Structures are given as C-alpha cells and as structure tokens.
Image (cartoon, helix red, strand yellow):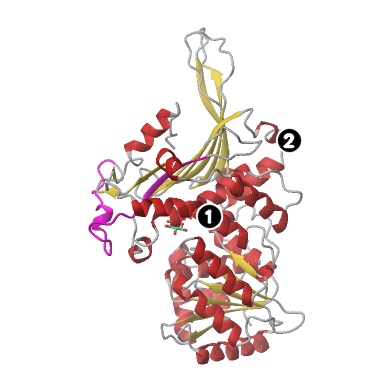
Amino acid sequence: MAMTPDRRSATETPEHPAPAPLQPAEPCSIVIFGASGDLSRRKLIPALFTLAARQCLARRFAIIGFARTPMTGQSFREWGRKSIQESDGDGKAHGDRGNDFLKGFAYVSGEYDHPEAFEKLKQCLERMDREYNLEGNRLFYLATPPTTYHLVIEQLERSGLAKPASGKAWTRIVVEKPFGRDLASAEALNRSLLAVFDESQVYRIDHYLGKETVQNLVALRFGNGIFEPLWNRNYVDHVQITAAETLGVERRAAFYETAGATRDMIQSHMLQLTSLVAMEPPAKFDATSVRNEKIKVLQSIRPFDGENIQAHLVRGQYGSGAIRDGAPPVPAYRSEPGVKPDSTTETYMAAKILIDNWRWAGVPFYVRTGKRLAKAVTEIAIVFRRAPHLLFSGQSVGANSLLLNIQPDEGISICFQIKRPGQQMDLKSVPMDFSYRHEFGGRELSAYATLLNDAMRGDATLFDRADGVEAAWALVDPILNWFQAHEPSFPNYAAGSWGPAEADQWMERDGRHWRKP
Ligand code: BG6
C-alpha cells in the first residue's frame, strides 16, 4: 500500500512550525497522461510527493503514468525517484519516505488514440482500486501536448472511464493550459469535454491561481476592513501587473513559436491576476461565487479593437544581451534552437487594460510580461492617487503603493512617505514589509501541490470555468488577428533589459512610469 511518509519536514523548526496542513484528499488513483514529459517530471510528481510528505494526499493512493514512451512500472518508479531528487536535491527521495511514495506507481504505455491502450489503463485502474482500496475515485490529468486532448477525451468515453466507477466514486479531469489557441478552438475543446464530462468534473488549471500570494490577494482584500474601502477609482490611480522572466524560450520553441507571450501568458495568467484584483467581493468563497465575479471583470474589459490595439499594446522580441552586468551574453530569440530565423513571435507583451464598470472606470491596469528581462519577478502594484494638496513646498511627493510580491520573495509591502530625520521637512518613501519567508520560514506549497490537492478534494474555486476561458480568448482573439496582419520590426529589446523602449514611452505618454522591481 502506498503510505504517506513521515510528516515532519527537514526544514521544520520550533520558530517556523509546519503550516497548518491542507485537508487530506480522499483515496484515489491519479492518472497522468503525458507522464514521461517535462511537466510531469518538473512539477506534478514533485508536487504529489510534497502532498504525500505533508499528509495531504490520502493515505491510500496510486499514481499511474500513461504515455507513448515505453517504460515498465519499475522504470517509471526510478524515473519518479529522479524527478523528486531533481526537484529538491536533498535526498528526500531516498529511504522510506521516497520508497513509500513510489510504491503506488504504475505505468501504461500506448498511443492516445488506441482503444487497446485505454483497455490496459482500465485494467490497471481496476487492479490498483482492488489492491489499494481506492474506492474507485479517479483523477485524470491531461499533461500531453494539447493536440491530443480530444483523442484522450474520446478514448476515456469509449472505454467507460469517464463515468464514475460506482455510485459513490468520483471521476475528475484536470486540463493543463494552453486551453485552446483561440476562441474557436477553446469552444471546441469545451464542447468535447462537456459532451463526456459534467462541468463539475472538469478542472481547467492555471497554476498562477495556486501561488500563495495570489490566494492572499483575496485574503488581503476581503479579510481586512482597511483595504477594500480604498480599492476603487476614488483612491487608485492605476494598477501595474508584471510577470518578468530572465529565462528564454529554453527547449520549448516548438510550442512557443505557435504561442508567443499573448497566448502563453496574457490570455491565462495575466488576465487571471487582473480579474482577482478587480473583482467585486463574492458572496461566498466558493467556486461558483468567485468564478461568477471573475467573469464579470472579463466581460467589463474594453475590447481591443483596431485603434485600441495600436494605442494600448506593445509587443516585443528579445535580441541578444547579458542578463546581468558581466554575465555572458545570451542569444537572440531568433537564434534559439528550433526558432525560425525570421520569427515574428512576441516574447514580450504590455497591455493597457481598461475596465468599464463603476469601480474601475478611468483606472488603467498596465500588465506586462516578457522573457529574458532584467529580473525574474512577478508582482502586482496598486498605485494610489497622490495626496491632493502638497503642504511641503519644493517636494515632489511620491504616490503610495501596495505591492504584492508573488515571486520570488513572496510578501506584501505598503509604501508611504515619512520625514527623514533632521530639521528639514524632507520626505522619503519607505516600505512596510510582510515577508512569507520571515513569518512562515518559506515553506509554502508549490502552486501545483495546492491545486492538485484542491482537485482531489473537489474544490474548483481556483480553477477556470468554460465561460471563463472563453471570455479570456474573446478578448485576446482580436489582438492575435491584428498581430498576424501587421508585421513587427523585431528584435526590439535586448536580453537583460526591461523590454522595448516603446513600452516606457507609452507609459510616459500617460504621465506614468513602470516600476523597476
Ligand atoms: C507557463 C508558461 O504557463 O508559465 C511559461 O507556459 C512560463 O512560458 C511559466 O515560463 C511561468 O510560470 P512561473 O510559475 O515560473 O512564473
């Protein structure tokens, strides 16, 4: 039986006790389609191991890999061990802790459109159900290339695996992003899924929603009395959302060349963050209420039509450059392996989002994301209006801001003015910081661990609904069409910079500037 390892973690100390555990999931089988791939190795298996180590995975579970790559159960276990070792490098995969976790591993190899392969999967699931007493509960995870999603869904239906194994058992399916590549394909995927599964069985994942500070945005807004009264056009000047990476396209050119920053980041992560910042207080913190409020934000965003696109968007692509002073230069996007030498794929996007509703009318949300930028950082800055009257002559008083650092230094800061010591009334902006690491010892769960646990417990609050993904694509589609019709002049920013100069000029025209995180 796959038993969960010892609860106390190596980094737990009396000053930093383990955070309150998540509620454990019910016994179940987790089937990973695309199990031999990158996502499974780098994120899913380590996340499941963390859940097991923190006793948030049920005491009885099985992890069944399904992929085209031929492997035996034993080699899948070894592969799983390597994945855990790579993810934390401290040898946790050795000894009883790792062995216990890996006991419940099984593997089925086959093509995604072969009924016989799904027959084998069914037999394997039934065997694991009996052996580990899993009560017929099943979580399917689509981590394959998105082109195979339809095939897998079809085979799950044909083999009878889409239906719960018994009256009391549950079957759920997690669908990895990208969920479609435009509105039409997202609608088609929703149709395939909903022809076979009920919406309540479908978990469309966006891992940003599992990040600790993203969830804390909701706690900050609705768990405190002091922020929400200021959270509107009367007090907020603008909002900046930055997701900057120093990494380039890595080995993902085959995917990225067909996606670009708009599909990869704006349609999903950036619009999710925008919705959470902008939504009205939901009636309850449950899947229906939260998702209803988020979708209203998407529906209130002013559509990007022709004129708006030119005035409200900046796209970019990195040329070569050094990420830090003295670091060796990295190649331009067009020289990365697998990228076309004349590629017009954007690796940077900045957008000015206008939300036409009572709370946000006239408050721009500036969002930007890019690869090979100067610093790896994701943050949300709520920039408040300046003090209406300046008492202190000759001083330019900065605006107050509230910063949510999503990564890497998770925390929340408020910036305000103080007087420097001395006779003069000399003002300075200072931060008041809350740091996760300082308060909790930096032991927050990975986003995937949080979301896998939620899916196994049947909590869809942090997952997207069919109408939510479609509303996001409806906003992004006109941008993609415009990009196709208008050739950019790339590359237009150096690796290691903060993106195209045009993005700075564009902010300056609005009388604002990008924060330098
Ligand atoms: C993924 C994108 O969804 O998010 C990647 O496909 C991107 O291109 C990644 O690098 C960023 O995630 P994180 O958690 O590292 O900010």
- Pointers 1 and 2 in contact (CB under 8 A)? no
Q: Amino acid at mark 1?
A: Ala
Q: Nearer the viewer, residue 494 or 234?
A: 234
Q: Nearer the viewer, mark 1 or mark 2?
A: 1
Relative to 216, say whether 422 is above or below. Answer: above
Relative to 211, say whether 351 is above or below. Answer: above
Q: Position of residue 191 (x, y in %)?
A: 59, 71
Q: In terms of secondary structure, what is the magenta stretch mainly?
A: loop
Residue for badge 1: 474
Magenta segment boundaries in residue numbering: 325-353
Question: Dot 1 surroundings within 10 Å: few (below 14), some, or many (20 or more)?
Answer: many
Image position of 258 (left or right of 268)? left
Which quarter of the image is occupied by the N terminus? bottom right
Is residue 254 among the parts visible in the rendering? yes
Q: Position of residue 171 (x, y in %)?
A: 66, 77
The residue located at (66%, 62%) in the rendering is 460
Q: Secondary structure at mark 1?
A: helix
Residue 225: numbered disc: 2
The residue located at (49%, 71%) in the rendering is 143
